[in-house]
Image (cartoon, coloured by chain):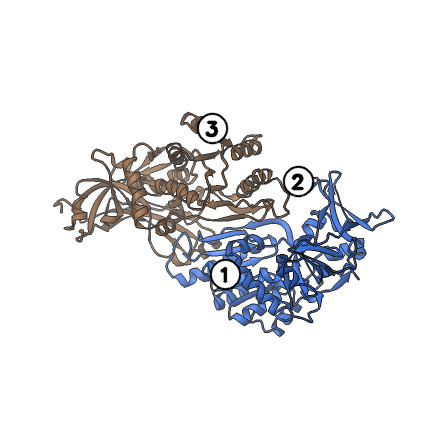
Chain colours: A brown, B blue
């Protein structure tokens, strides 16, 4: 192990209290020396994904964020409704670690061959506590990148890449041949577009702004549907007919989009079925909600027959379900293509202090497409 | 075959026209002589199930039903909205057969052993055109009852019995150990209650009136929750905790009930999980919508983590999925227990003329629990 490992370093934690406030605070934490199977990563970058915000902000109103530093360390306080507090009793008063994933350089390693093999390497890692200057991790939590990889490029090697690959794997496993993605211009959407182009899989990209149509078109996407256009439903129907997509992955969650997708998949399927059935077509139509950009209720008009499913989709259970070998195959593809297929772009870079600055919190909590934030804890 | 088979007899058909009217009409139809594998059933009784109403009334407003007879045969006309007409283009102008199932006596049979074995027997049958005086059917569409069975008792041997058995089979196949049913006091609900008591399966019966609590209690049901009570949500939580039910079958469809069930299944599961996860518990919670007593939209607040599914459930695909042998086993249980476990009760008996009488149409279209109608075409 390295001699110049600090004994302590800074990290971010998020604490919800029963007075209806969640506080994100910088604090000192011990840097544990690695055991045999562990490594210590100097964290250079960690993205703020939509999936991080739930733990960071506890569903609070980021627009009402206020400074809450104690004069030693910076902090930010955000109000949380009583109902949201009640739904999160299990975390009350506990300083929760935050940051699902990050990238950095292995600066110390235990004696095991797997740990030693990582020493000096740039790695991406999945840890749930990535907003920190140093992290002591099991070697299996790290994905080694090719020499010369920028740690910032390795920072988002798990959540979005494996989710995008998982969508295509799920599509195949459940017997569909093409898919719909409801946030086509997101970082994840751009990855999915590249995967589908490489693998020859039909993809209907739904975007919410005209400029995103152009962006995806320039990236080679064939089927792009703008939900803000007057022609949305006709465009959607045409894209579904062209691709035969019968499964959708939806990051929006709230509103009527999931129902609209089921309804229009059914419309295409029943037109092809010919004979009338009062139960709709036999074609199974599936929507998986994997995010909640719209936290409002999901409304289904149920005008899509009886062969349909709606459900939650989450990365970890998916990886467990497919098993270690299949998961390793997906991880290796991510490492091999980290600067191409799985490249992320960021709208802003934040120090730990920036990450708890109320103005920055307001901005990244909006999760605007193209404006993802990257935390750089050692910057 | 029998010498006294009539050459023609009466039947009901339902025709939707693009002027926004659906007409149910009595008409003469040929009684086809049976081929080798066929039998002719003199239909004594056929239930009006909720699943029949879609084809009969095409989603029209039964409260506006008007007589539409032509002086020879009776008929009833019901207005249908433009949107509903548009969704049913494939049936426009076609006189659709109606009546999923019925019961009667086999009065003629083809030469095959299977057909001959049914001659003179009381049978239940599944045909999609049961509202008729005679039906020529393949022998495999019939389920022979024990000698002495009243044809009225055999009339509802398929839809409700196999659906109730299918719910328990689905529960087991998908790894759940107890279930919820949202119309506990319906004919189907009473069957399901008897199945679960016999098989030792935990069942949460949801009912919508206090008197249904008493009715089910008298029938031995242990967990009965009245959704009209102020204590509904607490009662539901207690019943879910007691049974461990993580799958529900919902005949209502519209409104917030499906979401409430998912939410409270999650509440019980996450309380048992202990550790906080922002994605909710790992327990998969499932709701299947198999009916649409409330045709309004389904609203989900999504306060139930990420391990959940909602979908349509339909008998025919289920029977295909489990295969012939398993389906035959379920059918034989129905025949063996047709006057006990699978007994139905009816609020009214209707001749074919009654079935197209506007006042009767208004009544049976309400689908009130305990007021199911039985059509008796030869009465």
Task: Please tell me which residue is depicted at 45% across the width and 53% down the height of the picture.
Answer: B305
Query: Considering depth in this image, is A300 or A132 the residue closer to the camera?
Result: A300
Which label belongs to residue B90?
A: 2
Query: Considering depth in this image, is A14 or A113 the residue closer to the camera?
Result: A113
Sequence-first tag of 2 and 1:
2
Picture coordinates of residue A135 (x, y %)?
Answer: 24, 47
Name the chain letter of the residue that bears numbered label 3.
Answer: A
Query: From mark 2 to mark 1, how far is it between C-alphas?
Result: 34 Å
Query: From mark 1 to mark 3, how far is it between C-alphas?
Result: 44 Å
Name the chain letter of the residue that bears numbered label 1.
Answer: B
Q: Of tags 1 and 3, which is closer to the observer?
A: 1
Q: Are dots 2 and 3 in contact, CB under 8 Å?
A: no
Q: Residues within 10 Å of mark 2 (few under 14, many from 20)?
A: some
Picture coordinates of residue B378 (x, y %)?
Answer: 78, 60
Which label belongs to residue A168?
A: none
Is A16 situated left or right of B4 in this image? Answer: left
Which label belongs to residue A213?
A: 3
Picture coordinates of residue B205 (x, y %)?
Answer: 58, 65
Q: Residues within 10 Å of mark 3 (few under 14, many from 20)?
A: many
Query: Considering depth in this image, is B281 or A336 the residue closer to the camera?
Result: A336
Q: To which quarter of the image does residue A184 belong?
A: top left
User: Dot 1 corresponds to which residue?
Assistant: B171
Q: Secondary structure at mark 2?
A: helix
Q: Residues within 10 Å of mark 1 (few under 14, many from 20)?
A: many
């Amino acid at each position: 192990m390295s001699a110049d490992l600090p004994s302590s370093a800074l990290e971010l934690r998020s604490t919800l209290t029963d007075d209806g406030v969640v506080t994100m605070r910088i604090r000192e934490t011990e840097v544990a020396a690695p055991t045999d199977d562990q490594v210590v990563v100097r964290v250079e970058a960690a993205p703020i994904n939509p999936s991080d915000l739930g733990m960071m902000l506890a569903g609070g109103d980021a627009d009402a964020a206020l400074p809450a530093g104690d004069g030693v360390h910076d902090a930010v306080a955000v109000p949380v409704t009583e109902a949201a507090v009640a739904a999160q009793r299990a975390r009350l008063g506990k300083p929760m670690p935050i940051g699902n994933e990050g990238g950095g350089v292995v600066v110390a390693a235990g004696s095991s061959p797997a740990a030693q093999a990582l020493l000096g390497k740039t790695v991406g890692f999945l840890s749930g506590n990535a907003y920190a200057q140093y992290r002591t991790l099991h070697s299996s939590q790290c994905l080694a990148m090719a020499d010369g990889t920028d740690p910032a490029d390795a920072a988002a090697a798990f959540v979005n890449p494996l989710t995008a690959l998982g969508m295509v794997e799920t599509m195949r496993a459940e017997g569909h041949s093409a898919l719909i993605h409801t946030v086509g211009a997101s970082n994840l959407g751009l990855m999915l577009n590249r995967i589908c182009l490489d693998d020859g899989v039909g993809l209907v990209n739904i975007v919410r702004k005209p400029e995103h149509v152009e962006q995806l078109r320039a990236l080679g996407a064939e089927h792009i549907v703008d939900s803000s256009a007057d022609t949305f439903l006709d465009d959607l129907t045409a894209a579904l007919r062209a691709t035969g997509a019968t499964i959708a992955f939806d990051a929006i969650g709230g509103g009527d989009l999931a129902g609209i997708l089921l309804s229009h998949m059914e419309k295409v399927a029943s037109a092809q079925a010919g004979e009338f059935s009062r139960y709709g077509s036999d074609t199974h139509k599936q929507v998986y909600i994997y995010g909640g950009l719209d936290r409002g209720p999901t409304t289904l008009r149920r005008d899509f027959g009886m062969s349909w499913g709606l459900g939650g989709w989450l990365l970890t259970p998916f990886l467990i379900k497919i098993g270690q070998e299949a998961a390793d195959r997906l991880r290796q593809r991510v490492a091999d293509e980290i600067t191409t297929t799985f490249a992320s772009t960021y709208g802003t870079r934040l120090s730990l202090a920036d990450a708890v600055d109320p103005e920055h919190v307001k901005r990244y909590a909006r999760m605007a497409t193209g404006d993802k934030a990257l935390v750089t804890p050692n910057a």
